[in-house]
Image: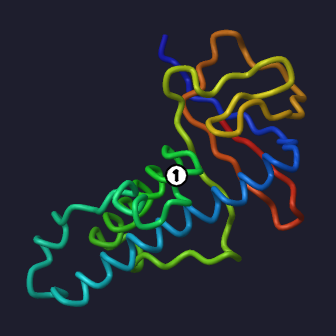
Amino acid sequence: MTKQNKAFKFRLLPNKKQEVLLVKTFGCVRFVYNKMLAERKETYEKVKDDDKEKLKQQKFPTPAKYKDEFPFLKEVDSLALANSQINLQNAYQNFFKGNADFPKFKNRRSKQSYTTNRVNGNIELQDGHIKLPKLKLVKIKQYREIPADYEIKSCTISKTKSGKYYISF
């Protein structure tokens, strides 16, 4: 029998300190995405149609590149920053395949969310709370039971326009 992927979405109830860190993380993820996109766009404008193959194979800068220049990036979950790099890479691949427009810069009004991955038990459900990187235990409204054999691979934390936080995994 093959394992089936299943997603769950619950309301996240962070305290004030956790809320501040969530807002910082949303901002840092957006900042890193836009910074990397600006570098890629600059290179794209220089090369454009001359050598598209070279552009496709160009290496992306990593979020770690910016941590010395921008120390506030060290405060947030590094996996969230790494996922913004992957998102940009996917946006570029879709552009080159002709499936999408050139990647756009993210602004504060765009969806506020970030994804983090489970590594060495850094994400775990614990009696009405979820343990998350940098945030520690955050209260969740768990309205249904998750099967015992369910394995969390990653989770996405998002904030609605009304200010409510959700977690999907």
Image quarter where the C terminus lies is top right
Q: What colour scheme governs how the chains and residues are painted in the rendered image of this protein?
A: rainbow
Q: Position of residue 47 (x, y in %)?
A: 15, 86
Residue 96 left/right relative to 146: left
Tag 1: Cα neighbours inside 10 Å, few (<14), some, or many (≥20)? few
Q: Position of residue 71 (x, y in %)?
A: 50, 60
Q: Position of residue 84 (x, y in %)?
A: 47, 57
**Residue at left 19%, top 87%?**
48
Residue 48 left/right relative to 75: left
**Residue at left 73%, top 42%?**
167
Q: Amino acid at mark 1?
A: Lys
Q: How many marks?
A: 1
Residue 106 left/right relative to 130: left
Q: Identify which residue, 42 or 146, lies in the foreground.
A: 42
- Residue highlighted by disc 1: 74
Q: Secondary structure at mark 1?
A: helix
Task: From this view, report whether residue 76 is shown above or below residue 53.
Answer: above
Task: From this view, report whether residue 121 is shown above or below residue 25.
Answer: above
Q: Position of residue 5 (x, y in %)?
A: 57, 29
Task: From this view, report whether residue 105 is shown above or below residue 87.
Answer: below
**Residue at left 41%, top 79%?**
101
**Residue at left 87%, top 50%?**
16
Where is residue 56, by image quadrant? bottom left
Where is residue 168, by image quadrant? top right
